[in-house]
Amino acid sequence: MVVAPVNWDNYSLEDFMTNPPEKTEWVDGQLIEKAGATLRHGKIQLRLGCYWDNYKESSGQGGKVYINVPCRTNKQGRSPDVAYLTPELVTQFGNVPTLPRSFPLSAEIVSPTDLAENVLLKAQEYLESGSEEVWLVFPDSRWVMVITENQGLMFTSGQVVSTQKVLTGFSVAVDELLA
């Protein structure tokens, strides 16, 4: 996603934690607006969120699925496109304005204007801050990368992508997700 600075002088990470503005992230000392989402981006984001939500209910795993919800990493304030919080973490943090750690399972839908290196660094940041699994969805190239602390897997058109550590047993065809 393309990011544009928001004109809020002296907006700190603590400010972000207590009052996170919608569609923003706090990166490198600046509040930035997440921009550049397309209709396709939104459709995939909603679809993946619904799939994860339906699966956590049908499998009995519980928890909560969120879209564009703020969390704090070790370095920044982020807002993953789709995120899953386990039942235990919902009990612990379900009413805070910003999750004080990364979500166990997060997904970023990559925009055409995103730089690959930046998206991979964001995934690494999530993993270093408590996330167990990060999905990077590349709509134009029809790829889904699933990254954990110990591995990175690539799924392409014609394949089925599945969770590796969190929301155990979930899978979806790449073509169905990106339709």
Image (tube, helix red, strand yellow):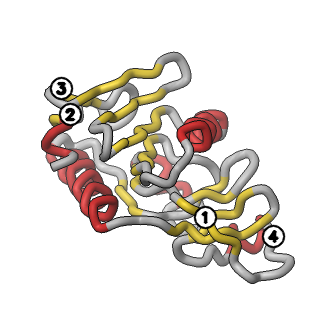
Task: Check if mark 1's residue and mark 4's residue have beta carbons within 8 Å.
Answer: no
Please say whether residue 4 is visible from this viewpoint.
yes
Query: Is 97 placed above or below 104 here?
Result: below
Task: Check if mark 1's residue and mark 2's residue have beta carbons within 8 Å.
Answer: no
Q: Residue at x 31, y 38 (%)?
A: 141
Disc nearer the start of the sequence (2/4): 4
Q: Position of residue 34 (x, y in %)?
A: 55, 67
Q: Residue at x 76, y 82 (%)?
A: 8
Tell which tag, 2 or 3, sits nearer the viewer.
Answer: 3
Q: Which residue is mark 4?
A: 12
User: Considering the numbered disc 1 on the image, is that residue within a helix, a strand or a loop?
Assistant: strand
**Residue 130 falls in which quadrant of the image?**
top right
Disc nearer the start of the sequence (1/3): 1
Q: Residue at x 66, y 68 (%)?
A: 32
Farthest residue, direction top: 150
Q: Amino acid at mark 4?
A: Ser
Q: Amino acid at mark 3?
A: Gln
Inter-mark Cα distance, 2 to 4: 39 Å
Farthest residue, direction right: 10
Disc nearer the start of the sequence (1/2): 1
Q: Which residue is mark 3?
A: 159
Inter-mark Cα distance, 1 to 4: 17 Å
Tell which tag, 1 or 4, sits nearer the viewer.
Answer: 1
Is 170 left or right of 92, judged from the image as shown?
left
Pick the front one: 68 or 111: 111
Please say whether residue 85 is visible from this viewpoint.
no
Inter-mark Cα distance, 1 to 3: 32 Å
Is 152 left or right of 51, judged from the image as shown?
right
Q: Which residue is mark 1?
A: 3
Circle 3 packing at 10 Å, graded few (<14), some (14-19), many (20+), is some
**Residue 173 falls in which quadrant of the image?**
top left
